[in-house]
Amino acid sequence: MSETLALINIGFLLLLVVIGLTLYPKLSRSYRLLLCIQILTFLSAVVQWYMAKFHGYNNIIFHIYTFLNAILFGLMYHSVMQQRKSKLFVLIATITLLLFLAADSFFIQGLRAYPHYELIAISIVYVTFALLSNYEMIRYSKEDQVIRSSIFWVNSSVILFFSVNFIFWSLYGYLLRIKSPIHFDLIKVLWWLNFVHYAFFTVAIYLNSRKIQSSEN
């Protein structure tokens, strides 16, 4: 990512964080965790830009980010699940994922390598969480409530964004070896999906704030 694109990304994330913070008092616990994911992503983008510009590398920041991100995602999905079995599954899957992320950072790829194995792993886990949450939502919610539901927007974003991430990072090593130009096209797709992903999160945060406010009135 060029410095200009990195700064655009930072500015965009900052805008979303500011919007989220203005809504923070009206949010439920689950969506405060979602806002924390937004804040973590913004801070990570700032530190990544600084490390790349002044130190020439930032891969270690990605390792730290994926680990903290997995904790927040696990806590968020654990709180939105309605069934005890679903909550237990999220807990076990999150702990397993964290163990793998730690092993990859210190023993497999190492802290100085870009953690594409970790991105493959979190993509699988997050999409599974989103599909399970969608199943619960469809089972226990009325049809006309689905699109207006905050978790619908979160799950839609997660499924779209991390499914594409899984495909890209699974092919990453092969595309580099054959020097395929498709590699650069997919990076552009991920770049634009990044905007959509976090914009959807902000829509979910807004809808949750409206729901909490309506219930209080």
Image: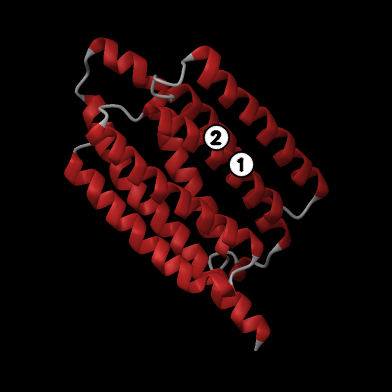
Q: Tell me which colouring the rendered structure shows.
A: secondary structure
Q: Which amino acid type corresponds to the residue marked 1 in the rendered image?
A: Ile
Q: Position of residue 120 (x, y in %)?
A: 49, 27
Q: Quadrant of the C terminus?
A: bottom right
Q: Residue furthest bottom?
A: 217
**Dot 2 surroundings within 10 Å: few (below 14), some, or many (20 or more)?**
some
Task: From the viewer's side, name the closer residue of 118 and 105.
Answer: 105
Residue at 29% from the left image edge and 40% from the top image edge: 50
Q: Which residue is mark 1?
A: 71
Seen at 58% across and 24% down, the residue is 102
The residue depicted at 50 percent of the width and 26 percent of the height is 118
State which quadrant residue 30 falls in. Answer: bottom right
- Classify residue 193 as left or right of residue 200: left
Provide the residue designation for mark 2: 67
Please determine whether, in this image, residue 152 is positioned above or below residue 105.
below
Q: Disc number at residue 179?
A: none
Quarter assignment of residue 149: bottom right
Q: Nearer the viewer, residue 109 or 126?
A: 109
* Secondary structure under the numbered disc 2 in the rendered image: helix
Whole-percent x, y for residue 44 in the image? 40, 43
Extreme residue in the top direction:
177
Whether label 1 touches label 2, CB < 8 Å:
yes
* As drawn, 46 above or below 106: below
Q: Residues within 10 Å of mark 1 (few under 14, many from 20)?
A: some
Residue 34: image location, x then y, percent:
54, 56
